[in-house]
Image (cartoon, rainbow, N blue to C red):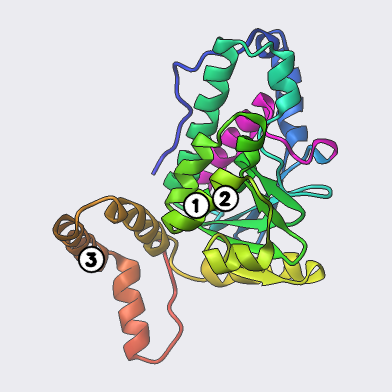
Amino acid sequence: MKLERCANSETSDQFLNLTQSEKKMTEEALVLRHDDEGVTTLTMNRPQARNALSQGMLRALLDAFIEVSTDEAVRVVILAGAGPGFCAGHDLKEIKAQNYSRNYTEQLFADCAELMQTIIRLPKPVIAQVHGIATAAGTQLVASCDLAISSQDARFATPGVNIGLFCSTPMVALSRNLSNKHAMQMLLTGDLIDAQNAYRMGLVNEVVDAEQLERKTIELARKIASKSPLTVAIGKEAYYRQAELPLSEAYNYTKEVMVRNLEARDAQEGISAFIEKRHPVWCGK
């Protein structure tokens, strides 16, 4: 699956005033990439702002995810945050500095929606590696990733209601991850929840000690990276598509997916390897 940025996106005057080289430097500074044996870690790099999702950060993340989507060497993506927290949500100081311009806010939330959908559409699993705080659109990022591992010290919240700005876009991801009661509790109270409650509510898959967070996340990523990349891509796409379908349509769709999957060389190799009691050799086809 090839992902591309929307061609008709407008940009703010502030961003247009940057030269191409300045834009590239900004993007490189805002998102760091590290590749290791099929696992790519994308690290949000605004530690002084708790990795708040400025317009520049959103665009840098979009570009980074689109880049890895077509990189055949990448099997799994880890999304992490530099500094004391994962992500504090949208950059309220930037929003205020833009004087709440409608053109700016429309583009900001369009970029945010595009980023979350890009993560879902990415043909590679994305694991959130969460520490410190993940609030508002930061919680939305966690909920949008396929999997999430959290340190014990992590805290989550959708606190927009406390400042008169309901977390409506984070609500989309939350409502698709949590039960209605849990999602509404977070949205209506704005309260911080700890990592163990986030695990109980289904927002994260596992909670580990802070010093084990990176190791545990990489272990999970490498386990998934050892599978057939074609099979994983087929499965991820099918999971999200069937989830939105009525039951009978979901079965009609997934039975066709199974038939197509069985025609793939990796599926046939995997079945042969299982029968012959050996390790499969994936070709990604």
Which secondary structure, mark 1?
helix
**Residue 183 bears which disc, if any?**
1
Which secondary structure, mark 3?
helix
Residue in the image at 82% along x and 69% along y: 211
Principal SS element in the magenta part? helix
Where on the picture, by quarter, is residue 101? top right
Tell me, yes or no, whether the two marked residues, 1 and 2, touch with CB atoms within 8 Å: yes
Badge 2 density bin: few <14, some 14–19, many ≥20, Cα 10 Å: many
Magenta span of residues? 48-72
- CA gap between label 1 and label 2 equals 5 Å
Q: Observer-nearest residue: 202 or 186?
A: 186
Residue in the image at 42% along x and 45% along y: 121
Q: Is residue 128 above or below residue 19?
A: below
Q: Observer-nearest residue: 163 or 251?
A: 163
Residue in the image at 54% along x and 19% along y: 107
- CA gap between label 1 and label 3 equals 33 Å
Q: Earlier in the sequence, mark 1 or mark 3?
A: 1
Q: State the image coordinates of residue 49 (x, y, percent, origin top left).
A: 80, 36
Q: Earlier in the sequence, mark 2 or mark 3?
A: 2
Q: State the image coordinates of residue 238 (x, y, percent, origin top left).
A: 31, 56
Residue holding disc 3: 258
Where on the picture, by quarter, is residue 180? bottom left
**Residue 20 bears which disc, if any?**
none
